[in-house]
């Protein structure tokens, strides 16, 4: 980290996240920090943070805490790229640096009994997040959604701060009513 703004963000995010045991309190304390961070993104985002791939959205690691309690990524979304339907198993705060990111939520109708099948989801609302927007989520109840950029929009770049190293998460097959834990890769800084 060679940017004072990024170093300050990491220091404050670490301190605030350790002060708040409740995920909702944690994201409440961290969202204003993300708002400030995206205003200064040009001072710390390097060319490697903008790496992208035609095969899918790209996760570029910016910071990972030594104790795995925080991770910060720059995600690059080319037109037509989407996540699978997923949850996070963590709290998170997201800020949009460039473009318009679209989030389509799902609502769980079946009780969560920890099973990976018999999961009934229905589509929920939509949120359009443009440059400067900040959003957050907590793990319980699961924040189940799909995120991306429609083919007719331009590239989007977003910063994602998670309350753990985000190297795996649950994906959902809505039609089959199933959930599966997957491991995901990222590019190192």
Image (cartoon, rainbow, N blue to C red):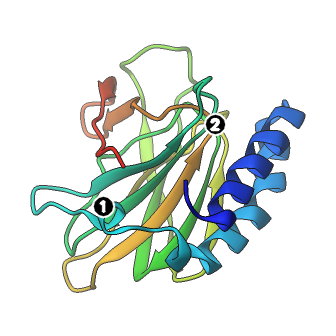
Q: Nearer the viewer, residue 104 or 21?
A: 21
**Residue that appears at 26% across and 75% down:** 150
* Position of residue 169 in the picture relative to residue 22 (left or right): left
Residue 136 has which mark? none
Q: Picture coordinates of residue 90 (x, y %)?
A: 60, 34
The mark tally for this picture is 2
Label 2 element class: loop
Residue count near mark 1 (Cα–Cα under 10 Å), binned few <14, some 14–19, many ≥20: some
Quarter occupied by residue 5:
bottom right
Q: Can residue 128 be seen in this view?
A: no
Q: Which of 7 and 164 is in front in this view?
A: 7
Outermost residue toward the front in this view: 2
Q: Picture coordinates of residue 41 (x, y %)?
A: 54, 74
Real-space Cα separation, disc 2 to disc 1, in angstroms: 23 Å
Residue count near mark 2 (Cα–Cα under 10 Å), binned few <14, some 14–19, many ≥20: many
Q: Picture coordinates of residue 73 (x, y %)?
A: 46, 52
Residue corresponding to mark 2: 163
User: Looking at the image, is 66 positioned above or below residue 121?
Assistant: above
Residue corresponding to mark 1: 48
**Residue that appears at 44% across and 62% down:** 104
Q: Picture coordinates of residue 10 (x, y %)?
A: 68, 50
Of tags 2 and 1, the one toward the viewer is 1
User: Looking at the image, is 43 positioned above or below residue 95?
Assistant: below
């Amino acid at each position: 980290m060679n940017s004072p703004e990024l170093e300050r963000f990491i220091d404050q995010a670490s301190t605030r996240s350790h002060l708040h045991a409740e995920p909702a309190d944690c994201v409440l304390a961290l969202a204003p920090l993300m708002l400030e961070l995206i205003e200064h993104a040009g001072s710390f985002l390097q060319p490697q943070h903008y790496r992208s791939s035609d095969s899918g959205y790209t996760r570029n690691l910016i910071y990972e805490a030594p104790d795995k309690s925080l991770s910060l990524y720059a995600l690059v979304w080319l037109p037509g790229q989407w996540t699978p339907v997923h949850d996070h198993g963590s709290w998170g705060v997201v800020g949009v640096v460039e473009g318009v990111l679209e989030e389509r939520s799902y609502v769980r109708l079946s009780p969560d009994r920890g099973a990976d099948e018999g999961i009934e989801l229905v589509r929920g609302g939509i949120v359009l997040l443009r440059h400067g927007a900040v959003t957050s989520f907590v793990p319980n109840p699961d924040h189940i959604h799909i995120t991306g950029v429609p083919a007719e929009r331009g590239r989007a770049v977003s910063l994602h701060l998670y309350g753990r190293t985000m190297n795996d998460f649950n994906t959902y097959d809505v039609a089959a009513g199933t959930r599966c834990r997957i491991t995901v890769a990222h590019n190192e800084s």
